Image: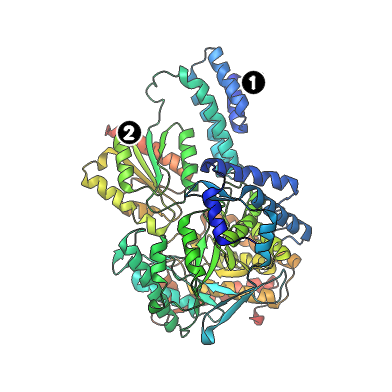
């Protein structure tokens, strides 16, 4: 018989929502720590899903199905979670597609992958004015602002974001990551970002690195 | 009959659906129709010669469209259509589109599968970012190509030294500058009246686009604009406003559709039927006179991968066999200018496209991402390949054998494709001619492609 954790991983990879919910209930019934189930089970499953997606063994509908299954299980576990302990939450990210840009497919994939990796993601949607990124990041005391642009005419707003943060004297409060079809690493660097992700998998790794750097510097 | 204003009415009164529910519905329905019509991608049949498969892909795309409808992002409402309405629109779709004036008049007409009529070549750097001082030279390099039927724009990083930002006054200024400079490039190319198929590609907002489409800036009757769907199967009022303007003006309009393989639709089979459905979207929501697809691989940002070649071919065959729509494709390569890989990628895409009934919008290279990586030589490579494929009378089975062999030359390098040389490294900017190095590289590749059966003497 498979161990409960193994079953959670398998059910998450299969995107079996009913099974994930049932297993989450089993976690509570058996007195297992919910965070253990999340970290070693559901998140581990989503890690495999993410790898399959990167290799195009899974496509976006499968990725969304698996994320939904995990989300449904989280609803069962959430009331029992209590206060998170150190290291249990990766960080808070304000995410959106920049002003003038209505393309959100890539941003939505990044959101799913970041959430699956344990980040708290506040998705502002698309066509987001830079002052809204700043306002929401301040309001939430976010760790990272992640911005996507697919068009050359809209990525021109990216330097404005870092400039505005500097002008307000709060640039060091946040880590900035840029991505999107038209954005290159060179452009992101020149625009003052702390990092660039060429796809969702890179975005997750980058976010983790930025959080490590931030924690080490004790910036927040 | 279905009237444009009835389409707009449906965007206001159709059933309300949350956007994320619509996104999920795309994949769910597409998968359902893939199963219903038993559509299977065969990696060894990149260019299928299976008419029944093509017809099934068409029927699946049509049924998907009838079931799904078009999503209007502004209202969250679905514009749904019945079969009679779609068939009426197909029956009354244009059979020809004219570009250019005087000696540069060119007419795009329908191509069929394995047609000996050469593809219409719309040459363009597809908005490749270029320094302002090199903009005219770059676009001239496309306009001056002998096989260029029309041309279009690069993307200048700045206009009068100022960066272009969507929605700002500078965007309007830049859009006007773009039209002025395109016509300047046409004159410099010695083809002052050549058609410009997309007059404004550096403005996202409709106000800026329409401000620039004026005769005094260089726009001529028969020039045109692209109207792009938002993937997958969505439109908004910014795009539909262009349609209204174009209905009242002497300019043409074409639909632009870029479904992502691996995205909301799923794999190659389901993305194929969603791509077919996009053509109905363009016909009804944009009244598009012709249709240009740029289906892309979600992870690679190009369409030279094996599965995308299949998708390009089978969707073109589906539409060619079942409609008289004027259809084209924008090849997107992973490699950049002055590399052997870019020649092979272009050859593979153009082979798949041309035998399947498509026209050619040539060509986005280096994943259409890297500044200064684009030149008229890539359009030449594509146009020459398209011409000889048609004139040589290559059949689908032959084309498939050739493409399989060409794929072997680059397929494993797609992930790490070279971005190639900058425009100013592979062209002499004074003469606006390709360097001898690039010409020699092309000759070497032609020799290898000749060995696979392509007869370049027919160009």
| Residue A155, x across and y down, in percent | 37, 55
User: With A45 as the anchor, is B319 left or right in this view?
Assistant: right
| Residue A41 in sight | no
Q: Secondary structure at mark 2?
A: helix
Above or below for A54 versus B219: above
Q: Is residue B369 left or right of residue B90?
A: left
Q: Nearer the viewer, residue B303 or B213?
A: B213
* Front-most of residues B196 and B307: B196
Mark 1: give few (<14), some (14-19) or many (20+) Cα within 10 Å: few
In the rendered image of this protein, does residue A65 appear above or below residue B426?
above
As displayed, is residue B397 above or below residue A199? below
Chain of residue at mark 1: A
Q: Residue visible at 73% across and 50% down?
A: B39
Q: Position of residue B280 (x, y in %)?
A: 62, 58
Q: Position of residue A164 (x, y in %)?
A: 25, 48
- Say which label, 1 or 2, has the lower sequence index: 1
For label 2, the residue is A140
Label 1 sits on a secondary structure element that is loop
Q: Mark 1 highlights which residue?
A: A2
Mark 1 and 2 residues: CB-CB less than 8 Å, in contact? no
The quarter of the image holding the N terminus of chain A is: top right
| Residue B150 makes an appearance in the image | yes
């Amino acid at each position: 018989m498979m161990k409960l954790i193994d079953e959670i991983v398998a059910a998450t990879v299969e995107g079996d929502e009913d099974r994930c919910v049932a297993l989450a209930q089993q976690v509570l019934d058996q007195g297992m720590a919910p965070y253990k189930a999340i970290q070693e089970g559901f998140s581990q499953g989503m890690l495999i899903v993410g790898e399959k997606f990167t290799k195009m063994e899974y496509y976006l509908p499968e990725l969304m199905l698996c994320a939904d299954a995990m989300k449904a299980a989280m609803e069962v576990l959430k009331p029992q979670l209590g206060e998170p302990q150190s290291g249990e939450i990766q960080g808070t990210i304000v995410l959106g597609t920049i002003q003038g840009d209505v393309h959100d497919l890539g941003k939505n994939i990044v959101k799913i992958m970041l959430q699956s990796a344990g980040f708290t993601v506040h998705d502002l949607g698309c066509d987001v004015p830079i002052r809204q990124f700043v306002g929401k990041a301040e309001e939430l005391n976010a760790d990272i602002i992640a911005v996507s642009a697919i068009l050359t005419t809209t990525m021109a707003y990216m330097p404005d974001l870092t400039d505005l943060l500097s002008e307000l004297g709060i640039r060091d409060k946040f880590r900035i990551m840029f991505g999107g079809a038209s954005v290159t690493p060179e452009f992101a660097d020149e625009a003052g970002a702390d990092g660039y992700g060429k796809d969702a998998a890179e975005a997750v790794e980058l976010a983790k690195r930025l959080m490590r750097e931030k924690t080490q510097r004790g910036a927040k | 009959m279905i009237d444009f204003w009835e389409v707009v009415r449906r965007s206001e009164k159709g059933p309300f659906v949350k956007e994320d529910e619509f996104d999920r519905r795309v994949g769910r329905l597409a998968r359902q129709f893939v199963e219903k019509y038993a559509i299977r991608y065969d990696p060894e049949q990149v260019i299928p010669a299976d008419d029944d498969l093509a017809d099934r892909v068409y029927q699946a795309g049509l049924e998907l469209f009838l079931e799904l409808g078009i999503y209007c992002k502004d209202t969250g409402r679905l514009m749904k259509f019945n079969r009679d309405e779609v068939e009426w629109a197909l029956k009354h779709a244009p059979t020809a589109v004219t570009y250019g004036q005087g000696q540069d008049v060119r007419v795009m007409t329908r191509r069929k599968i394995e047609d000996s009529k050469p593809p219409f070549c719309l040459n363009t750097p597809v908005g490749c970012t270029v320094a302002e001082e090199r903009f005219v030279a770059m676009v001239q390099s496309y306009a001056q190509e002998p096989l260029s039927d029309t041309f279009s724009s690069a993307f200048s990083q700045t206009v009068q030294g100022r960066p272009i930002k969507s929605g700002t006054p500078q965007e309007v200024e830049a859009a006007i500058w773009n039209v002025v400079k395109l016509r300047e490039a046409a004159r410099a190319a010695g083809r002052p009246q050549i058609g410009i198929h997309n007059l404004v590609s550096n403005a996202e907002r409709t106000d800026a686009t329409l401000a620039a489409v004026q005769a005094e800036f260089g726009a001529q009757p028969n020039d045109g604009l692209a109207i792009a769907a938002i993937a997958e199967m969505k439109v908004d009022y910014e795009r539909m406003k262009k349609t209204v303007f174009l209905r009242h003006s002497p300019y043409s309009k074409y639909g632009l559709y870029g479904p992502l393989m691996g995205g909301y639709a799923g794999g190659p089979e389901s993305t194929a039927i969603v791509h077919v459905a996009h053509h109905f979207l363009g016909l009804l929501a944009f009244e598009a006179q012709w249709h240009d697809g740029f289906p892309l691989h979600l992870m690679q940002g190009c369409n030279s991968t094996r599965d995308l070649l299949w998708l390009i071919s089978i969707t073109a065959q589906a539409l060619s066999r079942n409609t008289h729509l004027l259809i084209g494709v924008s090849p997107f390569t992973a490699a950049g200018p002055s590399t052997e890989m870019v020649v092979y990628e272009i050859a593979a895409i153009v082979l798949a496209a041309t035998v399947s009934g498509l026209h050619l919008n040539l060509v986005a290279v280096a994943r259409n991402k890297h500044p200064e990586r684009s030149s008229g030589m890539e359009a030449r490579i594509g146009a020459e390949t398209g011409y000889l494929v048609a004139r040589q009378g290559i059949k689908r089975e032959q084309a498939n054998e050739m493409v399989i062999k060409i794929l072997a030359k680059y397929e494993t390098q797609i992930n790490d494709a070279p971005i190639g040389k900058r425009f100013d490294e592979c062209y002499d900017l004074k003469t606006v001619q390709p360097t001898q190095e690039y010409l020699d590289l092309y000759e070497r590749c032609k020799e290898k492609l000749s060995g696979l059966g392509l007869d370049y003497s027919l160009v």
